[in-house]
Each structure stands twice: as C-alpha cells, then as structure tokens.
Amino acid sequence: MKKAGICLLLAIGIMILSHSVFAAGMEETGIGSDNDKSVSDVSEASVLNANENHTGESETGYLTLDDKNTYEGMEKAYEEGYEPLVKDGWVSVILPIYAAEENDIKALTAMPDLGDTASAPFIFRNYRKTFQVTNERINGTGEEKAVFLIRFDLELSKDRYNGVYPVEIQIDYHAKGQEISQVFTIYVQITDGKDKKETEEGNEGEIDKEKQQDETQAEENIPVNQENAGTPVVPETPKEEKPTSDPKVIIEQCIGMPEQIISGSELEFTAVLKNTNRTKYVQNITVAVTCEAEGITLKNSSNIFYFEKLGTESTLEIPLQFHIDEKTAAGKYSIVLDMSYDNPDASSLTSSGKIDLLISQKIDMALEVGKFASEVNAGDSIKIPVQAMNLGRGKIYNVRCSLDVQGLNASKSLFLGNLDGGTAASGELDVFAGMVDEKAESADKRYGKTSGNIILTFEDENGVEQTHSKEIVVTINPLELKTVNTSNDKGEKKVIGQQMAIGLGILASLGILGVTVPMVLKKMKKRDSYE
C-alpha cells in the first residue's frame, strides 16, 4: 500500500509539472493569447519601431520620422495612431521623413517589403521608387514643411484575409560619404477581407459538398446544382471590368515667350505641364528637354527635370533658358519635352510635346546718301544718289527709298528689290525743287533752307516692315528772270527763254499756268509795241 501511494503521488506531481510547462509554452508562443490588437495599439508600435534608433544623427542613419504632423492622405499623425487608408481594394501607405539641416541628402530610394507572398494580402510587384525633398502642406493648413513624403499605393489581393500585416520600408541614401540604409515599419489592418476561422470551418463543409458533387457529376457527367441535385448549373458570366483611362500629361502653355526671337539673344520662358485626368494623379515624373538644332543651347544646369507628384487636373512649371547663336539661320525650330511618369498603379506611362520657336536673323541695314547740290533754285530738277546695304546675315525683302522733305518733290519711290546678307543696292531719286512754304505771304518766306528725311523701307523674312531714315538739308532759292543785251538794238533787254520756261514750269506745278501765261505774254507784246 505504501508503494502504491508513493507511485500515485509521483504521477500526480508529474501531471502538474507537465501542465505548467505546457501552459508556459502556450503563453510564450502566443497560442491562446489575445491576438485581436486594435489598430491604434499597432500604430503606436509602428511609431516606436520607426523611430527606434532613427532620431537625429545616430549610428544607424540620419533620417527621422515626422510623427507630429499630418499630410495629404493622412487622417492622423503617427503619434496619434496613423492608420494607412484601405479603400476599394487599395491601401495607401504614407511615410513622411526628414533629415537634419546639416545633412545634405539630395535624394533617396525606398522599397517596401510586403512579407510572405503566401500569406500577405498584397499583390506583389516592383514598388521601388526614388524620392526627393518637396514642400508639403501640413495639418490641412497653408503651412508647409520640407520632407521626403514617401507614399506607396499597394493593390490588395481579392483573396485577402483580415488581420494586421507589417510593411517594412527600406530606405537607401548617400550621406557624409557613406551609403546608408534605414528600415521603417508600418502596420496595415485589413478589415474587408475573409475571416480565417469562418473560412476554415466553411472549408470542412465545402469539402464534403464538393466530394458529394464530384460523385454525382461522375455518375451523370453533367454539372449539378448543390441545392437541387440533377438540375444543370448555368455557369455565371464573369463581370467585365470597365477599363479606365490612364492619366495624360501635356504642355498646356508657355509663359513669357517673346513674340520675336532674334539670333544672338537670350531666351527665357516657362513651360506649364498639366495632368488632364480628373480622377488619377501621376507620380515619379521625369521630363527630358532636347533641341537638335545647332545654335540653340539649353542653359539650365541639366536637361532632366524630376517631380514627385502631379495631382488631378493640376499643373507644374518648368523654367527654361536658352542661348540663340548669332549664326542660327532664320526659321522655325522645335524644342521637345519627353515625359515619363507612373499612374497610381505604378504602371509606367509616357508622353511628349513640342514647343515651336520662330527665330529671325538680326537685321542690320544701313543707308548712305551720295553728293548732290545743297543749294538749288525753284524749278530745278536734281538727282539724289542713295545706297542701301544689308550688313546682317539674313535676307531683306522689298527694299525701297522715298523722300520726305518740304519743298522737294520726288516723282516716285526708288525700288531696290531684295538684298541677301552682306550685299548692297544703289540708285537715284529724281527730285523737283519747288517752294518751301507756298502759303507764305512774302517771297522771302516762300523759299529758303529746308530739311527732311530720305526713308529706307524694307521687310524681314516674316513680312514685318521696318524703316531707317537719313536726314538731308537743302536751300531753295526763288526763281530768277535774267536779262541780256541783244545785238540788234543797244540797251534793249529781253527775257531769257530758259529761265522763263523754268518759271512757267513752276507755275504749271502750282496749277495757275492757264491764268498766268496769257498775262505774261500780253505784257511782253505791249512792251514790244512801245518799243
């Protein structure tokens, strides 16, 4: 009896010890514990994990999580329990981080680790992106902060299960001569998926039903309805997913483009790009600016421009600077903007646009006036020699000269034609001298010194008319009637026919020849009769 009692006590002790060890093992592995953590608890853990060893310049890195502020797409800051937004089969993960001011980190690359492909609720693809510092609005106000705003829009699997899943974001960057990596962890809670317990219990019943259905189908070799065996099952027509248009980025306008671009000048303007889509933004935008024409040089530090994000129906501006060489021939040239970007699904898209530049050669025309009589009598006809010279490189069209001098009248303009660069053309203006001021009361005021311009008019290759002028000064004397002695009668005086003809010409030009000439002839006849 004593041995039996001792054995019984030993058996009871072994059972108690085994139960204690088993319970301790259950508690350590988490089996039987409360796994239904709230998102706020998980979010708080993610904040601690993200900030761990990453505050300030530590041995592990120089980037810090901004857990105080909210950004576009965030309802709460990290310290308040930020939760990634899950909607319509997508989850948006946002991670705002920044570096200390003394750390000159230009760019970084980020890549999310989505976990095990067999159990994670995400659709796996290459999500690796490059980010730069941008000024982002915080807390829904106009205040901005310079941060690396890392955002990943992750597509969810249709067969996802409810639960909390960690997303580790590895960030690589260059700082202080070193290649550094930091890892930030964010937790995503799925509540619109399948429940594991219900699925497991349902699977047992489904196995029995499928087994019974397989046996029935094997006997009848026809599809059967589970509720009414023997009734053929009409297969459901799969729903067609309506295609949606991808966002398109275009060149909307150019701000500050001059109306005329001259060779040898500097050109500055701003190209405005626009996302025309009303529902989808674009991201990771790269714009390459090229111009294959010789003599047109981009003066920006790089021909590649990068932008993190462009919202729906939003615009961004690219300031451009070019130098136009003096030797660039007149004509139309194109600047090409090749744009590549990603849609919200991280699919790569491209577009391109052209900006036309209409360039004109610099016009350099000169006008020279040759020697002519600086003092003439009324009624004289003179010729004024002129020469037009094209000192530029471009061709000049429809070159002509005209006269604008009070008292001098040109019968017509002098047409010199078209002039190539480095050529000249010359000719003479036929001019007739009259009165400086025909309305003046005294003869002294009707004549005298007068001045004006010889005007050179021409057109460039675009048909734009321009003028140059040269001033001239002339003295116009009044008409003189000279007398001479005749050989037949001493002391007899007669009017020289040449001067009279000139005088008559002047009177004719004034429109009074029909009245004045008969009067003059009558006086001459009367004088002869007296003699």
Image: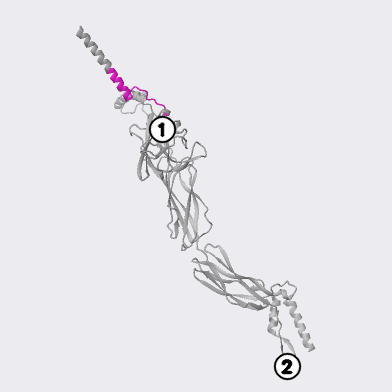
484 lies left or right of 52: right
Q: Nearer the viewer, residue 430 or 370?
A: 370
Q: Which residue is mark 1?
A: 47
81 lies left or right of 181: right
Q: Examine the structure image and report whether residue 133 is included in the region drawn in magenta.
A: no
Specify the amino acid type for callout 1: Val
88 lies left or right of 115: right
User: Where residue 33 appears, x then y in whole percent?
Assistant: 35, 22
What residue is drawn where x is 74% and y is 74%? 442
Say whether disc 2 or disc 1 marks the residue closer to the N-terminus: 1
Discs 2, 1 touching: Cβ within 8 Å: no
Mark yes or no: residue 9 visible: yes
What residue is drawn where x is 36% and y is 26%? 196
Q: Say which of marks 2 and 1 sits in front.
A: 1
Residue at the far right: name it.
530
Specify the amino acid type for callout 2: Asn
Q: Nearer the viewer, residue 458 or 74?
A: 74
Quarter of the rendering occupied by the C terminus: bottom right
Q: Secondary structure at mark 1?
A: helix
Q: Mark 1, residues whose alpha carbon is within 10 Å: few (<14), some, or many (≥20)?
A: many
Q: Which residue is mark 2?
A: 488
Mark yes or no: residue 156 visible: no
Q: Quadrant of residue 195?
A: top left
Q: Secondary structure at mark 2?
A: loop
Quarter of the rendering occupied by the N terminus: top left
Q: Nearer the viewer, residue 10 or 302?
A: 10
User: Where residue 250 appears, x then y in whole percent?
Assistant: 47, 48
100 lies left or right of 388: left
User: Where residue 248 appears, x then y in whole percent?
Assistant: 46, 45
The boundaries of the magenta stretch are: 18-39
